[in-house]
Image (spheres, rainbow, N blue to C red):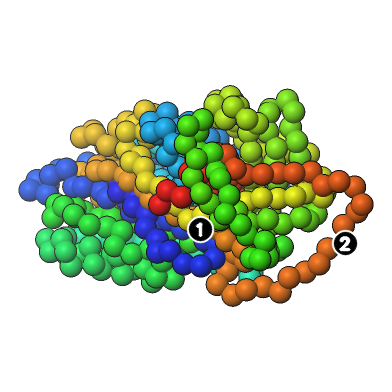
């Protein structure tokens, strides 16, 4: 399951990623590997009082932080971490609709969906896609899925229907025996759904491939309170005790939701985009990054969200454009998703004739931040400031960043900016 992210540099703030899951047929030669299991997967459409997509919010956040800890553990010192938890959870949930037995149980337990069944998860994603598609004019948020199916390979109808119905997935056929053409076709699909920002994501396809699942998340927002480029100056950013790099440091004094969490050694600020999305920046106190990372979980995010209050802040934020890549196959296996990658994988919900397993997952995401947050400059608004001295928040050392979507309570993107100048 190859998860590849690629985006082109542009002015403005955007975060983007796309994810392609490669399913290899274990044995194309042996087409008569019949595998009839009856799994009573009755879709009970339970509509609780709470919005169904909020059911995913807590497990997805837990999964996001487990993933962060695993990525961080294998991350080289000073490297940036950046990924889309929502994109990865969505792609894996879409894949789990075709998984059965232990393969399914392990996927659900890794995703944190132990108390839910597939039908509830499917309904919740259907609602989530519905909510996200009502995104306003000012922000661009595309989240969606695609399935490229090997010509002549016929996945079960129910699997295809579920992907269309619950995961707003588009299904198309490709001829994997011509790997270059197949890759070009898949890349065109991804490029068209990400405003041309994610290109050449898939390469080196195996002619044995049965299907590729694709998930893309593309976000571009504009700051509710843009920075004035006239105040941007060259300043030093301390990657670690011995390394400094020069950055374009933006500066803005304004009223922000801000919180200093003495107990957890952090300062937190919320920078809203126009629309339903905001960036939460978490700056650990000097020398406390490791301690904050070891302890951080979804309860911190909730605590910070609840504790923020309006304050005058002198904010210093570097302009940056970073991309980060990660190979997720080993991490997901360590997190408990073992069978999906092995020869005893059970994806009989996708095909009963052909035995399938996941081949690999890689992931790339990109984030770009500047003064306006979009390609068009915004009119500067003037705020009335109280007379008190502003707090100072200077992001001149590594910090954590979260892009949060409020209506669905989703973490669209998250990561650690160790070095804003590293592309």
Residue drawn at x 80%, y 54% is 255
Regarding mark 2 in the picture, which secondary structure is present there?
loop
The answer to whether 52 appears left or right of 14 in the picture is right
Q: Nearer the viewer, residue 227 or 339?
A: 227
Find residue 32 and report its horizontal and vertical position in percent.
Answer: 12, 47
Residue drawn at x 82%, y 50% is 312
Q: Nearer the viewer, residue 257 or 317?
A: 317
Instruction: Tell me the quarter of the picture where residue 103 sits.
Output: top left
Find residue 319 and report its horizontal and vertical position in percent.
Answer: 55, 56
Q: Mark 1 points at which residue?
A: 368
Q: Name the residue under label 2.
A: 384
Query: Of label 2 and label 1, which has the lower sequence position?
Result: 1
Residue drawn at x 30%, y 49% is 2
Regarding mark 1 in the picture, which secondary structure is present there?
strand
Say above or below: 339 vs 376.
above
Tag 1: Cα neighbours inside 10 Å, few (<14), some, or many (≥20)? many
The answer to whether 102 appears left or right of 302 in the picture is left
The answer to whether 324 appears left or right of 282 in the picture is left
Find residue 353 and report its horizontal and vertical position in percent.
Answer: 19, 48
Say above or below: 266 vs 122.
above
Residue drawn at x 25%, y 60% is 149
Asked if residue 45 can be seen in this view, the reply is no
Tag 2: Cα neighbours inside 10 Å, few (<14), some, or many (≥20)? few
């Amino acid at each position: 399951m190859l998860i590849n992210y690629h985006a082109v540099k542009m002015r403005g703030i955007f975060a983007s990623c796309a994810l392609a899951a490669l399913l290899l047929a274990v044995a194309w030669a042996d087409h008569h590997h019949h595998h009839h299991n009856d799994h009573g997967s009755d879709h009970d459409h339970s509509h609780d009082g709470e919005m169904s997509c909020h059911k995913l919010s807590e497990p997805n956040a837990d999964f996001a932080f487990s993933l962060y800890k695993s990525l961080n553990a294998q991350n080289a010192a000073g490297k940036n971490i950046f990924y889309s938890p929502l994109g990865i959870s969505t792609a894996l949930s879409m894949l789990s609709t075709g998984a059965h037995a232990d393969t399914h149980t392990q996927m659900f337990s890794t995703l944190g969906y132990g108390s839910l069944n597939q039908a509830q998860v499917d309904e919740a994603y259907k609602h989530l896609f519905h909510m996200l598609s009502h995104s306003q004019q000012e922000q661009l948020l595309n989240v969606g899925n695609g399935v490229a199916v090997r010509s002549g390979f016929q996945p079960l109808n129910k699997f295809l229907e579920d992907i269309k119905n619950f995961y707003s997935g588009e299904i198309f056929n490709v001829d994997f025996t011509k790997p270059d053409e197949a890759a070009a076709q898949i890349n065109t699909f991804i490029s068209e759904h990400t405003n041309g920002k994610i290109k050449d994501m898939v390469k080196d396809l195996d002619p044995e491939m049965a299907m590729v699942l694709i998930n893309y998340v593309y976000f571009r927002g504009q700051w509710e309170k843009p920075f004035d480029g006239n105040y941007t100056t060259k300043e030093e950013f301390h990657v670690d005790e011995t390394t400094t790099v020069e950055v374009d440091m933006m500066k803005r004094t304004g009223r922000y939701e801000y919180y200093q969490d003495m107990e957890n050694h952090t300062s937190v600020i919320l920078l809203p985009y126009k629309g339903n999305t905001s960036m939460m920046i978490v700056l650990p106190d000097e020398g406390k990054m490791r301690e904050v990372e070891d302890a951080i979980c979804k309860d911190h995010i909730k605590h910070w969200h609840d504790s923020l209050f309006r304050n005058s802040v002198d904010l210093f934020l570097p302009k940056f454009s970073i991309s980060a890549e990660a190979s997720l196959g080993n991490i997901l296996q360590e997190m408990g998703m073992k069978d999906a990658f092995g020869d005893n994988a059970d994806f009989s919900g996708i095909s009963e004739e052909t035995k399938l397993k996941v081949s690999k997952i890689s992931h790339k995401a990109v984030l770009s931040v500047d003064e306006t947050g979009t390609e068009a400059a915004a009119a500067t608004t003037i705020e009335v400031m109280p007379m008190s001295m502003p707090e100072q928040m200077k992001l001149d050392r590594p910090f954590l960043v979260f892009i949060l979507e409020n209506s669905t309570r989703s973490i669209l993107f998250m990561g650690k900016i160790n070095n804003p100048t590293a592309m």
